[in-house]
Image (cartoon, rainbow, N blue to C red):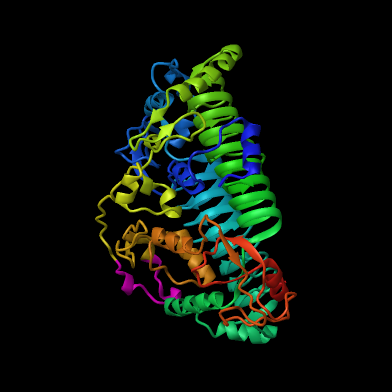
Amino acid sequence: MIDASDFDFYEKIKVPPPTWCSECDTAKRMTWRNERSLYWRDCGLCGKKTLSMYSKESPFIVYCHDCWISDKWDSLAFGKDYSFKENFFTQFLELQKNIPRASVLQYGTSVNCEFTNYTRNTKNVLLAYSVSTGENVYYSFTVDWSKDVMDSLMLKNSELIFEGFNSDHCYNSQFLIDCRGCTESSYLYDCVNCQNCFMSANLRSKQFIFYGKQLSKEEYNKAVSEIDIRSFKTREKLKKEFHSVISQTIHKYADVTKTVSCTGNYLSNCKNVSNSYSVYDSENIRNSIRVLKASDIGSVFSCGEGSELVYDGIVGGKTSSNINFFASADVLRESQYTDWCTGSSHLFACIGLRSKQYCILNKQYTKEDYESLVPRIIKHMNDMPYIDQKGRVYRYGEFFPPDLSPFAYNETIAQEYFPLTKDQALNQGYRWKDPEEKNYKIQILNDKLPDNIKDVPDDIVDKVIGCGHEGGCFHQCTTAFRIIPEELSFYRRMNLPIPRLCPNCRHYERLAQRNPLRLWHRRCMCAGETSENGIYKNIVAHKHGAGKCPNEFETSYSPERKEIVYCEGCYNADVV
């Protein structure tokens, strides 16, 4: 649904309104971001074996990261004249097939980060993705300004964290969900400024809370010490208890803090944000995901600090301005229909350019010729549109058709947010990649792992461990995994048992904690003295009295879910 403010935005950036619904449009963009499906390739320039997001079956020439950012090749050498005899997207596809692509995307400095993708300014990162300014980050996703992090999702400004989800400014803690400013704590849901707390929910500025009860320091330390947290069996029991705690407490209709005129989820310090998710310190954002310190952004996945007037693309980078219809941009300005372009301005239909301006199809033009040719191309896009294999028509103002995506649907993050079967993906015009056969020689069966971390020998780092799912799930299971030395050290430091699942299966379990990218209109579930299902008993009297709360809202909790969802007023009365 497009409202008046959306039309104002489209007019401001001089583009037509979209023709796809928001959800399908988002999935289409996501098919241009492959984070986790990595393959070994030989660099097309230096020959070095490198990990790449492009499989061997991919038609693209792939350069290792160092070669791609070097001056050993010139992307302008692939430039071509624009032809008014064939449609725009066909010409873009031809250019796309000829230009080398970077094996992985790593902006800024990158030290000891061979096994990662989509990072900026990182050190010692392994199989963690979408990490910005991080050090010692392992098996995690969407981590910003953090250090010593393992198995976490949507974490920022934190240190020494295991299984942190959507949490900020936390330290030396485990199993945190929707927490801020918590230290030396474990199994907390929606807690703020808490220290030394265990298995509790909806706490504010508390200390020494154990299973929701206030204890003295001595009582708390004794209670925690009696739980053998080093045992896998104990941890499984604690996990079930944590799920029970979460299901029996109230949930705010949306995780929004310090926001004005906002709808969506996971929003912080924002103003005028609509139908957007994982956005903070931003203003005037619509239909977007993962936006950090930016303004005037529409229909974008991932856009960073200082960017403005950015529309319909994926990976907008930092300080980009007035760009539309793009994939993987950084410090890019006044450009449209670009792919892997950085530090440039005034580009149209270009791929892989760095520090260039006034280029079309990677061919250099004068400022005057560029400004004369671009309007003619836009008119040509409308007069001779591209028609994809499903008969869908693409004129100026549309993101790249699925036919042009460098990846199969199930290689990309689209499969994580909008999962499809192979038949469904093919029917919608996407490609599909069948899993490669895995013949790992498993040395330790899953059920033979030591229960307690204290019993794990040092030589486990040399062993191949069988994943508990054995490939029988839909989580892109690798069927086997290894424990690296840094990982084993972390587990011992944090008193954690060895995991039983491969990193991919653990990742998908964390994704299940994330609410969908969709809003439902609902009514507050507060019924006066209790929640309407009778599970939760209110702590204080609410302003609406003994009857059912009349407040309604937009929420990412669908009506069939079991969580107890309160409006902000009822939630604040019991929690803040």
Residue 470: quarter of image: bottom left
Residue 457 painted magenta = yes
Q: Nearer the viewer, residue 490 or 569?
A: 569
Is 203 situated above or below 33?
below
- The total number of labels drawn is 0
Q: Is residue 291 above or below residue 266?
A: above
Residue at (27%, 50%) from the top-left corner? 436
Outermost residue toward the right? 543
Instruction: State the residue in front, 472 or 402.
Output: 402
Q: Would you say 234 lies left or right of 54 here? A: right
Task: Classify residue 447 by image quadrant.
Answer: bottom left
For the C terminus, give its image quadrant. bottom right
Q: Magenta span covers which residues?
A: 444-459
Please name the residue shown 73% across and 80% down the image: 541
Q: Is residue 74 visible?
A: no
What residue is shown at x 45% (from left), y 64% (from top)?
A: 488
**Residue 414 x %, y %:** 43, 49
Whether residue 353 is visible, yes or no, is yes
Residue 31, quarter of picture? top left
Residue 372 rendering spot, x and y as whole percentages: 57, 14
Q: Nearer the viewer, residue 138 or 179?
A: 179
Question: Residue 551 at what x, y percent from top left?
Answer: 67, 67
Q: Position of residue 201 (x, y in %)?
A: 61, 75
**Residue 484 lies in the magenta-colored region:** no
Viewed as shown, does residue 180 lie left or right of 313? Answer: right
In the image, taking residue 562 as reference, residue 412 lies left or right, namely left
